[in-house]
Amino acid sequence: MPMPLAVLVSGGGSNLQSILDKIDAGLVDAEVRVVLSNKAEAYGLERARRKNIPAIALPHMAFPSRQAFDAEMTRLINEHGVTAETGAVALAGFMRMLTPEFLRAFPQRVVNVHPALLPSFPGTHGAADAASYGVRLAGCSVHFVDEIMDHGPVIIQAAVPALPGEGGETLAARILKLEHCIYPQAIAWLAQGRLTVQDRRVLAAGTAPAYCGDDALPCLASPGLEPGFRPV
Ligand code: GRF
């Protein structure tokens, strides 16, 4: 059975789209059962509706507490067949911290993509912060989610050169292309049961770091991306 997946979005949902595209291509053995957003206007919801996937807006302001909001999300996610035993929850530009109660409902089953090489530049402006800092290597990370923002065990990272004088937006756009590769790859491994967490270390079955780009988008991914997940 494909791994039941819930995706949480707050915005455009291009990462959601990359997951849906790789599922359609037969590269990720998962099924997106529900897309939830704390923002009714999030375009990610529209992307789900177009594929006849249940898309639910849950404005967080309508809830008396963070716990109440997360409890309702948990209920809806479970109701759509996504459980800790067989399913997973993917944050794709979801701009809310999750409560310990939510994370306890899906232990080691919640993943996130972040536009920086963690632990550098956590927070909401990872790529822009890296550009302002003047780093010469930037990138993105997929990690398990824990109670601290952008902190849980790292599953995969990919690095790209950052150019002097380059603005945060240009760098963020280049990084986003790589997010669209590493996030579906990480979810594919999760669905295959190939990820084991020991302390902070994630053992992803057997791939070595690999150069995966070309002149247009030079990049290094670790673990390496499998065929089908590399930038095109
Ligand atoms: C991505 O850069 C992701 O890393 C960050 O938020 C952005 C979401 O983009 N967490 P999208 O909504 O998937 O297009």
Image (cartoon, grey):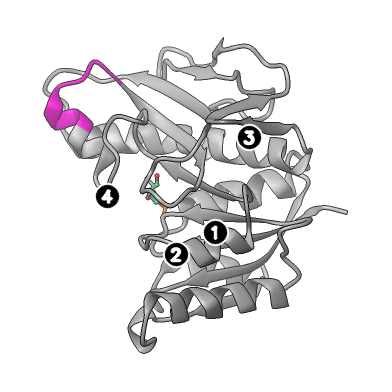
Task: Give the mark toward the camera: 4 or 2.
Answer: 2
Screen quadrant of the C terminus: top right
> Do the CB atoms of the residues marked 1 and 2 lie less than 8 Å apart?
yes
Closer to us: 54 or 157? 157
Give the number of the disc on residue 124.
Answer: 4
Q: Secondary structure at mark 4?
A: loop
Mark 1 → mark 2, Cα distance in angstroms: 6 Å
Q: Is residue 23 above or below residue 224?
A: below
Q: Is residue 212 above or below residue 144?
A: above
* Coordinates of residue 151 in the picture (x, y in percent): 40, 40
Q: Secondary structure at mark 3?
A: helix
Residue of label 1: 103
Dot 4 surroundings within 10 Å: few (below 14), some, or many (20 or more)?
Answer: some
Left or right of residue 184, residue 151 in this image: left
Is 49 in the magenta?
no
Dot 2 surroundings within 10 Å: few (below 14), some, or many (20 or more)?
Answer: some
Task: Give the mark toward the camera: 3 or 2.
Answer: 2
Give the number of the disc on residue 185.
Answer: 3
Task: Give the mark toward the camera: 1 or 3.
Answer: 1
Mark 4 → mark 2, Cα distance in angstroms: 18 Å
* Coordinates of residue 93 in the picture (x, y in percent): 41, 55
Residue projecting furthest to the front:
199
